[in-house]
Amino acid sequence: MLVKSLRNLYKLPRRDAIEIASSVLGMFGFEERIIDNVLDSDRRKLFYVLSEKKIVYPDREKVILPTEKREWRTNYWILNREVILATQKEEEAEEKEIEEVEAEVPEEVWESI
């Protein structure tokens, strides 16, 4: 799903989209959010790029520490499944449209190419 979304949104070659999707999904594992502190600077840059297309988005949680009576902030990245599914469907619709156009082209034209 994420590979198709990346290819659709960024017009990436399949190999690059697979590499990025593997990296992103490897960081999230089976979770929908990860703590920002686990990201190195290159991956954080990637997440900022992906956030421009809303594939991931940042979130923050504030907690008052009971022993110190001060606020503690934890920053997260959330995997946006809705956007991923929507952009995947866009690509599938485009592929279907191409197939329909190709089906309308007479066989003689294909043979002459």
Image: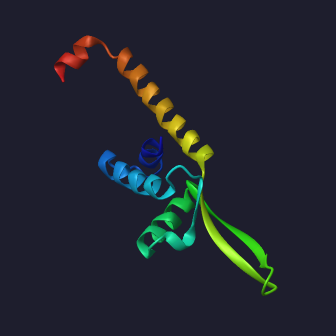
Q: Position of residue 17 (x, y in %)?
A: 37, 50
How is this picture coloured?
rainbow
In the image, 62: left or right of 55? right
Q: Residue at x 53, y 49 (%)?
A: 30
In the image, 77: left or right of 103? right
Q: Position of residue 63 (x, y in %)?
A: 77, 74
The image quadrant that residue 53 belongs to is: bottom right
Q: Residue at x 35, y 21 (%)?
A: 102
Q: Position of residue 71 (x, y in %)?
A: 77, 81
| Residue 12 visible in this rendered orientation of the protein | no
Give the farthest residue toward the front.
67
Front one among 104 and 38: 38
In the image, 30: left or right of 7? right
Q: Quadrant of the C terminus?
A: top left
| Residue 14 visible in this rendered orientation of the protein | yes
- Total of numbered circles in the picture? 0
| 22 is higher (above) or lower (below) than 48 | above
Q: Position of residue 92 (x, y in %)?
A: 48, 32
Q: Residue at x 33, y 45 (%)?
A: 14
Q: Residue at x 62, y 66 (%)?
A: 76
Front one among 40 and 100: 40
| 112 is higher (above) or lower (below) than 41 | above
Give the farthest residue toward the left.
112
